[in-house]
Amino acid sequence: MEAKKQKAPDTSKRMVLVVDDEEINREILGNILKQRYLVQYASDGIEAMQIIRRDHNELSAILLDLSMPRMDGFEVLKELRTDNMLSHIPVMVLTAHSESEVKSLEFGAYDFITKPFQMPDLILARVAKTIRLAEDTYIIRETGKDSLTDLPNMSYFQRLCHMEKSRMDKAGEKASFVYFDVMNMTAYNSRYGYAEGDNLLIHIAQLLQKIFVDMPVCRLADDHFAVMTDQKNVSEQLQKFTEQVKDSGKGRFIKVHAGIYNEEEKNETDPVIAIDYARLACTSVHDDYSTDLCVFNGALLNKYNNAQHVLEYFDQVIAEHKIHVHYQPIVRALTGEVCNFEALARWEDPVLGNLSPGMFIPVLEDYKLGARMDLYMVEEVCREVEPRKKAGLTQVPVSVNFSRTDFDQCDMVQAISDIVDKYHVDHSMIIIEVTESAFGNNPEFLKEQINRFHERGFKVWMDDFGDGYASLNVLQDNDFDLIKLDIGFMRNFDPEGKNGKILTDIVRMAQHLGIHTLSEGAERPEQVAFLQKIGCEKIQGFYYGKPRPTPEAIKEFQEGKSLPIESFDSAEYYENNWNYNFAEEIYRQIPGAVLVYREEDNVILFATKELVDMFECDSLGDFLAYTNHNFANMVHPDDLQKTIRSIKNQISDSANENVDYITYRIITKKGNEKLIDDVGRLMHDKHYGNIFFVSLYDMAKKKRALESE
């Protein structure tokens, strides 16, 4: 007779484990379950754990008796709960004692099956429901958790918060939402390595779970975490966290800032908004190492509402060109003429009216919209070139500000080039102005971008020079066309104190490096006079005018109220030929009134206040207008040939060390004739030709001084 083949197990069925020390119970329950499931059996906790560890990937549920020898059901529950590989397997407790149910739930049980086992259909239904619920929960957790820390991600965190909020509402409790930011994580990774940084984040995650027991905890991104907790416990919990987090770095300094949003009575705040409020509170103390936390308040709420308003209307105002370009003049100190404009954004809001840049620029940068904003500004400047030309306004280069984050969001060099080319604007007419703080991260990358801008004919300025700690390093490593001195120098203006000495030395240093200089924030005549005196080439500030939109600028021009604008020829000369590299000679304490001019065309390159006073002019610009920027126009017509012969003698005769003395007359702007003693020194320069440094004395004034001694 042929042997009967053994039936192979049905692998399509889910597997369950029945754990009970009484054989009769295992048999009864097994007979019920095997209709639908593959059933395995264990007679105590130790045997059960062996099977669970072996088959944990296949097990769909465990039916567990609590009272067993060697290792009881509570011990099994505890071990399952603390093992991440096993904690997802649902456990249904087999019990005849209702008092054990609460304790079982605390240990992680899903449901109960009451002894004696009756109503097989009900038992099968409850097992099926438990398996389905556990599998759904597992899927949610696996797809909604952070891969590094195993904490819920933001999406899953929201669901947990809604469930916890429902429980709190029923209990009459109020919630607190806490946002955590681990400080200087970039520096920590750089110093100790990314593996150590990950270990730190894992430790902080575990610490948060330990302190905020059974409360929703999540890792938002990078080194940012969030917690929802009971408001009455939050202070004590945060104190514990602050104390214990110090040990997270294994002896290394760790600082974590926290922002708190406390729910108010009958508050229906969505968890996402609540965490955003807490984030704002945390951000407000980001640079303050003297504090650990900040509680969200009314002022921060206003800031938040403003941010939401900006984000809501940004697309609309961009589409409708409601962010206007205002142009602030930049004046050449030597001539008093406008040589550049800075493009500044002004938001015409449909609800709030005009918004200052301080209200919307930081918001756009925080939400990674800065690049879009700044490229919009470039396009608006280019778009307005034609109407400004048609109105008769002489075109001068316009600077547009860019931040570090702009360069992270797109190929900024290519994007700007495309816009400028679209409007057929010469690249030299758009200046790229980058803040000094932009060089904090990845300076090599930004250096490369500066070189690319130069290759395409753009000039690059450094904004806010002196506001950061790395100014000199940045100057050393990058080729800037100009540095703009931070406005703080003018706010703390003190020409006779440290402020004046620092400004003087910065300008001299820039001159020696061949870098042009600009000071912003000049509002008073004494500030302008000082900047002219020390050789700062360009000046910007309310002294010369506030930012104006194109329609106002055109109106002022038509009414003859606008400042004179530099010609293309003058701009070419001052920008590309003369950069005050000769200032070292000027500052060797040359006595008298100092003049610098170029022999080839007699163009005046530099003049001190003493020379302006000598010619009885009101200002440097007044003096240059009177002389038409030409040394020959300074000299009395009858003495001009004598002066020219002296100049030629100096050039041809090297034996006198290029120094000569001559006396001639001048006629001041008020028509007065003066006899002048001229001590000139010739400097041969391979780039600029023959440059004369001249010290001038009013002979009558000098004679009176000698007679009074």
Image: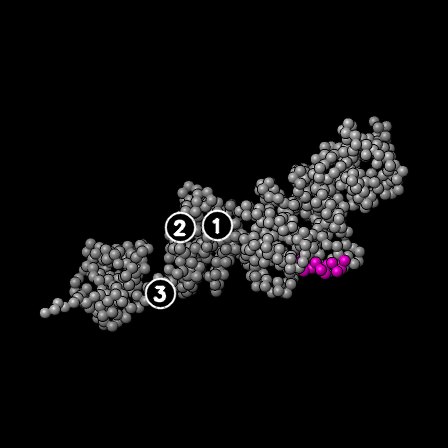
Question: What amino acid type is highlighted by mark number 1?
Answer: His
Image coordinates of residue 643 in percent, x first then y, are 84, 35
Image coordinates of residue 12 in percent, x first then y, are 27, 67
Q: Which residues are magenta?
A: 381-392
Check the image and report above or below for 563 versus 474.
below
Query: Quick one: which residue is furthest to the right in this view?
Result: 638
Decide which of 448, 356 is in the foreground and name it: 448
Q: Say whether residue 239 is visible.
A: yes
**Category of crowding for the residue at label 1, using alpha-carbon neighbours closer than 10 angstroms: few (below 14), some (14–19), many (at least 20):** many
Residue depth check, mark 1 versus mark 2: number of the one nearer the observer: 2
| Residue 257, numbered circle | 1
Give me the C-alpha separation between circle 3 and circle 2: 26 Å
Give me the C-alpha separation between circle 3 and circle 1: 35 Å
Q: Which residue is mark 3?
A: 136
At horizontal 72% and vertical 32% (from top left) the residue drawn is 588
- The reply, left or right, for residue 189 in relation to residue 525 is left
C-beta proximity under 8 Å, tags 3 and 2 = no
| Residue 465, numbered circle | none
Residue depth check, mark 3 versus mark 1: number of the one nearer the observer: 3
Decide which of 294, 573 is in the foreground and name it: 573
Question: What amino acid type is highlighted by mark number 2?
Answer: Ile
Image coordinates of residue 10 in percent, x first then y, are 24, 67
- Badge 3 element: helix
Q: Earlier in the sequence, mark 3 or mark 2?
A: 3
Q: Earlier in the sequence, mark 3 or mark 1?
A: 3
Give me the C-alpha separation between circle 1 and circle 2: 17 Å
